[in-house]
Amino acid sequence: MKSKLRKLENSIVFMIKLALYVLLFWSFYGMYSIKNWQLLNISRTSGVVLATYLITSYMFSNIYGRYDIGKRKSKPITHSLVLTMAFTDVISMLMLSVMNTNDRNNKTFELEQPALLLLVFAVQFIIILIFTYGGNKLYFTLFDPEDCIIITSSQRSLNEVIKGIRKYKLQYKVTKIADYRDVCLKDYIKQHDTVFVYDVPIKERTAIVEFCYQNMKNVFFNPDMHDVIETNSKHVILDDVSMFGNYSKGLTLEQKCVKRASDIIISIIALIITSPLMLIATIAIKIEDGGSIIFKQNRATQGGKIFSVYKLRTMKEDVENYSVVENDERVTKVGKFLRKYRIDEIPQFINVLKGDMSVVGPRPEMLANIFNYTSVLPEFEYRLRVKAGITGYAQIAGKYNTSPKDKLILDLMYIEEYSLWLDIKLLFQTVLVVLKKDSTEAFKKEENFIFEEYVSMENNENEIKAE
């Protein structure tokens, strides 16, 4: 029965999505139309407000994510929808207020029923909770987790990939782990629905991906440097020959000017808005141990230039300096709070004003880390093609303890895909970082996932071989 339902998965999810978005729309439009009759008639006001609602909703859905039950957990979906509707409702209400500023309604501009907006949002919040948690509950009742196999190269690689997969137990059920060199690999792939390929040499990975495509198997693989280049290449036709062209010229002069201007404006506004928060944090730091407030440390930015990054001090003074680990005794009580909500990063807007950093870009790593990472990943230095940033792909999609290679890929994707719209998108997405409990998750002192958790002890001959 469930196998038959799987064929109707897209149709079922589409109907649920349609019901959700219709209810969210009508909770705003319908409630506001009670005192704004023109919204129910064909009029300029109804057309402008409707267009504003639809465009804004679509834009912020692209920024924060859509209602993708079965793919993401309920809490992230809730965060995405709540933020999308909050911006959509406010902007649509402002547009309605503008349209109502005329001789027939309001002689001067005034907000259109701000109290009603709170009620609308409350109703939408309840709808979002019901459809998100109820939708995921229904989805995972109807559909079993996908039967998965992990193909990798070593115990270390397995440790890295299994961390993410095991957090989605309702979506994926790992029943097999195999070495990419196993002679029975193709038989294993045929027996599973989904294939995860991680840290496998490019030649062998390509063969595995093509075999999965041939046999209609879902396949996930971690990108490498050449994938970043290929993903951001443009399709060109020379006479009748298809090719992909990559233009690695960095930011244009126009892009640099726009980016610098936006950095200055955003930094000034951010420092003004956060000044009360900075004052409270400063007092708290002083009360706890009476030490210095600002912590300075040498970091590298564009072209390898060394500068002093500013942060609110979150550690005890005169302690050894290295990346934070789990339950780190160097972090103060106040520091834990500041780090959790990224308040310690606020002084870096001063670095942006000085021109050492940008608001959006790769995070500036400690010099010791750059040396260590580059010795293993020479391409890590490509991150220095642009200015270091306060926020970026790696900070939003990753965590504090995300592996250096995964951070590198995210940063390179940003550099290659750069646009003003991407910067705006990442700025709005930064709100999600505060909502993610594990975004500041520190490095664990020891982390090892053993095969026996997923593979029967009776199949020792088929277990992956650690390098």
Image (cartoon, rainbow, N blue to C red):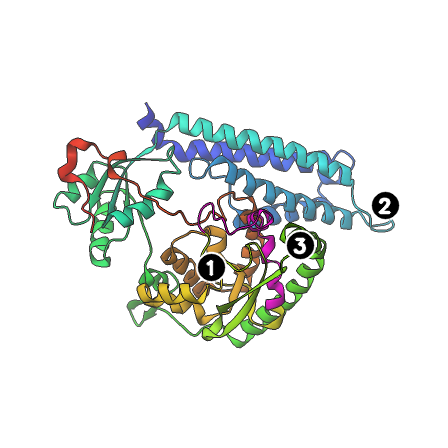
**Sequence-first tag of 2 and 1:** 2
Residue denoted by label 2: 104
Residue denoted by label 3: 286
Residue drawn where x is 39% and y is 26% of the image? 142
Report the number of numbered marks. 3
In terms of secondary structure, where does tag 3 sit? helix
Q: Residue furthest top?
A: 1
Q: CA distance from mark 1 to mark 3?
A: 21 Å
- Amino acid type at mark 2: Arg
Q: Disc 3 vs disc 2: Cβ atoms closer than 8 Å?
A: no
The x and y percentages for residue 234 are 38, 65
Residue denoted by label 1: 320
Q: Disc 1 vs disc 3: Cβ atoms closer than 8 Å?
A: no
Asked whether residue 450 is in view, the answer is: yes
- Amino acid type at mark 3: Lys
Residue range (magenta)? 325-351
Q: From the viewer's perspective, is 70 left or right of 265?
A: left
